[in-house]
Image (cartoon, helix red, strand yellow):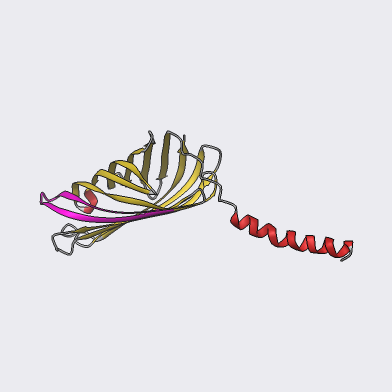
Amino acid sequence: MDVRSLAALAALCAAVAAPLAAQGAPAAPAPKPPLLHTQIDLGLVSTAGNTSVRTLNAGEQLVVRPGAWIFTQTLAVVDGYTGGVETANNLKIGVRADRTIGAGFRLFGLATFYRNRFAGVARQFEEDVGVAYGVLAGPTHILDVEAGSGRNQQTGTDGTTSQYWTSRVAARYRFTFAPNAYAEQKAELISDLQGLDNEQLNTETSLAAPLSTHIALKLDYTVRFVSQPQPTFKKTDTVFSAGLQLQF
């Protein structure tokens, strides 16, 4: 075999081996998340003249990761006025603790407070415990699924009260295009275990595009559906917001 044949054979072997080596190489590990992470969302719409409308939406998330624990605190507020009359007012506060137990699994416990007088909800408390699993751990794709059970206590604006045990399933998927640029989808289904055909579905769709290292433009669309709303109220509430997101 002459030198040219050997060179051609070597080039062919290299061309075949390169993609095989790339396929066999382990994926780069996801960067370790910081101990403390803060996220703040702000949006404001204000008009005057023939129409007077003011809507403020704000959100905040604080995440602390000491060792195998993840502690999360969230806050979301929407407040709106039309012609000087309040037409939107809802508040949601949540706290959550996750404990990593290995192989992508976590145990969690959470508690939330919700108020939306314009949906007939004066106050609602929810407590849940369950198991979460990280199907995809990033850094480009993140997929979490979880299931659990808990207790729901609700008081309507008409004074009626209800308490019941619930089941809860949820999922979160995030695709990261670049640092601080992502599309994210969250969904949770809460069902009444007392067999009253009482279900609640919450979804949130988000898209963020960075303007700088710590500031991004964010679009957010949330849907809250309840199969048995308070009397005279509709089953579905939606909120679309556009504003700035700050991350530290």
| Farthest-out residue, left | 160
Location of residue 67 (image quadrant): top left
Of 5 and 92, nearer the camera is 5
Q: Is residue 129 above or below residue 14?
A: above
Q: How many marks?
A: 0
Of 131 and 221, nearer the camera is 131
The residue at 45%/45% (across/down) is 243
* Residue 128 point in image, percent of width and height: 23, 48
Residue 156 visible, this angle: no
* Residue 238 point in image, percent of width and height: 33, 56
Left or right of 73 on screen, residue 8: right
Magenta segment main secondary structure: strand
Tell me which segment is drawn in magenta.
Answer: 144-173
Q: Is residue 103 above or below residue 68?
A: below
The residue at 19%/55% (across/down) is 166
* Residue 94 point in image, percent of width and height: 28, 42
* Residue 195 point in image, percent of width and height: 14, 63
* 170 part of magenta stretch: yes
* 72 part of magenta stretch: no
Residue 243 visible, this angle: yes
Left or right of 96 on screen, residue 1: right
Location of residue 77 (image quadrant): top left
Give the quadrant of the N terminus: bottom right
The residue at 42%/38% (across/down) is 39
